[in-house]
Amino acid sequence: MAKKTGKGRGRKNGDRPVKDAPQGAGIYVFGRARPSQAGAYPIHGEPERDTKFRPLPSPTGAPPFHFDLRSVIPPSDYQALVTAKKLTFHVNGDMGGIKNGMDQQLVARGMEADFKPKAPHSDNPAFLYILGDCVYYNGEVKEYYSQFYEPYEFFPRPIFAVPGNHDGESLAGEEPLEGFLRNFCAKSPLKMPEAQDSNRTAMTQPNVYWTLLTPLANFVGLYSNVPAGGEITAPQSEWLGKELKSLSKDVPLIVTLHHPIYSADDHHSGSTRMKKVVESAAEKVGRHPDMVLAGHVHNYQRITKHVKDGTQVPYIVVGAGGYYNLHHMMKVDGENMIPPVTFKDKEGDPVTLDRFSADHHGFMRMEITNKLIVGRYYTVPRQHEPYTKGNQLLDYFEFDWRAKRYIPNTLPTPVPSAVLTAHVRGRKAKKL
Ligand SMILES: [Fe+2]
Ligand SMILES: [Fe+2]
């Protein structure tokens, strides 16, 4: 117990004096904002975060760090995808339910309900791909059971991931990404001690940045490290360029990373640094990803970049996968946005926020064929809502990845477009 040393100075918060402690009001303090809200103060005495860049661990596989879906699923399942020319999968991010596991469980149950036992194999998700922040707050090995193995105990397919900042923000006593390496980049598919009574074995991805090869799409997964806004350095940045250049153009190339390039939330926002990494690699080799998937922001946003040649690139944030705290969207002139809303990014490139959900957790289901990427985003009930409400379809889109354009049969927006135009017209475009 801290010794009370004078008027208003007896609060316990480490050994730091409370900067704005009331003077002359006795030793009692109440009804005031936490000192942490003025910045530079530890919240609830939790350790101060160390968000510096961490060196990457040694790869567990050989360059160019390719991992084929066929090595994980039964040959007959793989052949079914090839024959149907269709791949279905789930995408999600920021899933660890450290403070309150119920949200994560509700999302897990929602994803399980998205499997249709009698549907053809290609119509059921072949895997779940996590966009980082698998385990909060520090990717600890001891948290893998409660935040990973237990919630997805009954998810009937393999789970892949790229690490997020929380997976890499190691504490003293653990190496950076130690838990992630053990459970996602194992040398062989062993059952780890941290899996406890779950039957799921460790995944065997070849590195913390890696490419998932499938017959219908390739997923180039980046590790954007711990610092705010992400940080990607050589050799990973060079590897990205090589992947963009060398991967087949007969199937779409999807880049996955934790820190989003674009986001219209009011907490993290997008990362110009990540934009530079991806854009400069793409410009150098003359091939841009067909789609970019990210997490980190705890909500859902479908943002579309309009390229000068008339093509479009979807940048989708899928980060409401289970962590209890959802992130709000920013307001324009004090008002809530009603999508679609078009902005200009810091380089003046126009991007449109097409759809978002910031008040529910949820998950994304995608289907890829030799022509289209079809996306469905479902919200799941919140804890206070009836569980019988089930999954609610919030967004639906069809993207022609060969023509690099949406095809116009997305779900109608709930507000007439004339109102939207009036809402956006006359407002100065904000920079994301
Ligand atoms: Fe997160
Ligand atoms: Fe994050």
Image (spheres, rainbow, N blue to C red):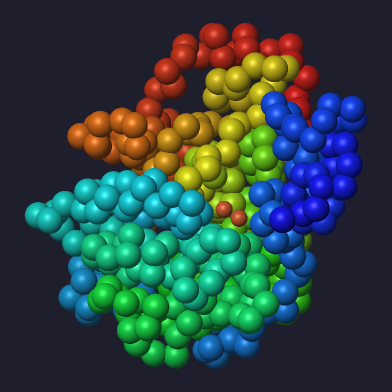
In this rendering, the count of numbered labels is: 0
The spot of residue 429 in percent (x, y) is 75, 24
The residue at the point 58 percent across, 38 percent down is 327
Tell me which residue sits at (22%, 48%) in the image: 113
Determine if residue 336 is in view: yes
Left or right, 4 with respect to 258, comes to right
Left or right of 390, for residue 191: right
Q: Position of residue 75 (x, y in %)?
A: 22, 79
Residue sitting nearer the eye, 108 or 91:
108
Q: Quadrant of the N terminus?
A: bottom right
Q: From what the image shows, is residue 324 above or below residue 159?
A: above
Residue farthest along the left direction in this orientation:
118
Name which quarter of the figure residue 377 lies in: top left
Q: Quadrant of the C terminus?
A: top right
State whether residue 282 appears in this view: no
Against 199, residue 131 (above or below) is: above
Name the residue rendered at 55%, 9% in the picture: 419
Quarter-wise, where is residue 230 in the image?
Answer: bottom right
Determine the residue positioned at 74% across, 49% down.
12
Q: Position of residue 111 (x, y in %)?
A: 29, 51
- Give residue 36's position: percent from left, percent from top: 75, 43
Q: Nearer the viewer, residue 256 or 76?
A: 256
Answer with the quarter of the image where residue 278 lies: bottom right
In the image, residue 76 sits, relative to residue 230, either above or below, namely below
